[in-house]
Amino acid sequence: MEVDALIGRIESTLGRGPHTLEPVTADEVRAATFRAKRGGYQETAVDFALEAFVVALETQAKRPVRLAMAEPTGELLREEWFETQAARVERVAFRPGRMGTGYNEDEVDAFLDRVVATLRGTTEFPLTAKEVREAKFSTVLFRSGYLITEVDKFLAGIADVLEQRA
């Protein structure tokens, strides 16, 4: 029963079940413990299944957040809309690069900090849409780096947002 309840929450979090259950994180799944029960699930099978779910949850958590590209209107005041965009940039998570290559994470993160400051109007040196489109980052080999195509696609959307800021 405990296992079934956790799997129900996992499936709900992954969008495969009813969305009425409380979402679960990969860390919560890792920390889950169950009482042994006669006639219950085989422990090894549960462990393997939960590890697969942890991978699925982590993969989902790293998907980039899509920017809302609709122009600010009526209910959302202009500054509120840009604050919403800044918050989305702060939450974005890129998948790791393939085959040990990707953009330097520190460089991308620092650049995204500048994007957030630009969107919030809290910098004396705001980025332009052109600067975002032309941004270049070092690539890394055989260590952690962001998937290049995801970063490029995300920044193209950010450039479109910044054009509306001008």
Image: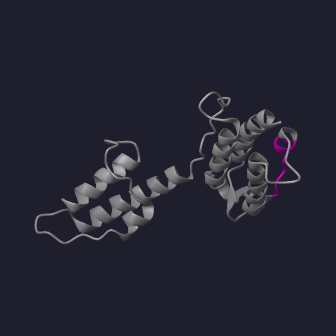
Res 6 quadrant in image: bottom left
Percent from the top left, x then y, of residue 84? Answer: 63, 44
**Whether residue 130 is situated above or below residue 146 in the rendered picture:** above
Does residue 93 show up? no
**Residue nearest the viewer, comparing 47 with 163:** 163
**Whether residue 118 is situated above or below residue 28 in the rendered picture:** above
Does residue 110 show up? yes
**Whether residue 67 is situated above or below residue 6 in the rendered picture:** above
Res 67 quadrant in image: top right
Q: Which residues are magenta?
A: 131-138
Residue in the image at 62% along x and 51% along y: 92
Q: Is residue 137 magenta?
A: yes
**Whether residue 118 is situated above or below residue 24 in the rendered picture:** above
Which quadrant holds the C terminus? top right
Query: Which secondary structure class fits the magenta region best?
Result: loop
Percent from the top left, x then y, of residue 91? Answer: 61, 53
**Residue nearest the viewer, comparing 51 with 90:** 90
**Residue nearest the viewer, comparing 75 with 110:** 75
Residue in the image at 66% along x and 32% along y: 69
Residue 81 shown left or right of residue 26 in the figure: right
